[in-house]
Amino acid sequence: MAVQFHLVLRKNLSKNVEAGKEKLFYAQTRSTGTCTFDELCEAVAESSTASSGDVKVVIDRVIRFLLMFLARGEVVQCGDLGTFQLIQTSSGSTTTETFSSNLLYRVRLRFRPGTKLRNLALTTKGERFKLEEVKPSVPSEGGGDRPEIE
C-alpha cells in the first residue's frame, strides 16, 4: 500500500539557511477520497450479520462509554484499534506552593494505535501523485445543436 503525496514549495525553517535554499519542496500527503460514517457502517454491515443501523447504534454506544470512562480518568483499551487516554501537562513551578492551575495546558486526547494500525503505519510507502494529463478538446466548427456562448 502507498500513501500518495504531492510536492509543495515552502519556506525553509532551518536555522542558518544557505543562500538559494530559502524555499524547499516538501511532500504533502494527498487524500484519495473520504469514507463517510454511513459508508463505513455499510461496509461493516456487508461483512457481518449486523445491519447498518445496528453498526451505527453500536458505534454510538462505544463513543458514549468512551467519553464516560475517559472523563473518569481511565485509559480505554479498544483491542486491535488501540487505546485512548486524556492527558494534560503544565508549565513548571519552582515549588509546590507556587504551582497553580493557571500553569496547566489544555487537555488532549491521546490515541495509541494497536499493533495492526501501528504496523500499517510502519510498512506503508509513499508514492508521488501524478496528475493524469487531460487533452484539451478541440471544438468542432459549426453544425452542432448547442448554441455558442459569447
Image (spheres, rainbow, N blue to C red):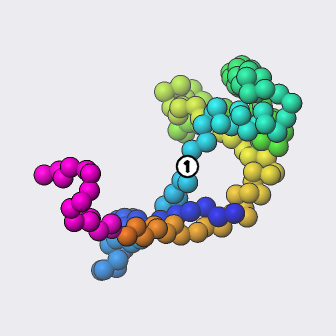
Name the kind of residue labelled 1 in the image.
Answer: Gly
For disc 1, the marked residue is 33
Residue 37 location (% of width, % of height): 63, 33
Chief secondary structure of the magenta portion: loop
Furthest-front residue in view?
143
On whether residue 63 falls in the magenta region, the answer is no
Q: What residue is rendered at 56% in x and 36% in y?
A: 90
Depth check: give the residue in front, 28 or 40.
Answer: 40
Above or below, comparing residue 40 to residue 139 in the picture? above
On whether residue 144 falls in the magenta region, the answer is yes
Query: For this view, does 141 lie left or right of residue 34?
Result: left
Q: What residue is rendered at 75% in x and 51% in y?
A: 117
Span highlighted in magenta in the image: 136-150
Q: What residue is rendered at 70% in x and 58% in y?
A: 121
- The quadrant holding residue 108 is top right
Query: For this view, does 137 lie left or right of residue 28?
Result: left
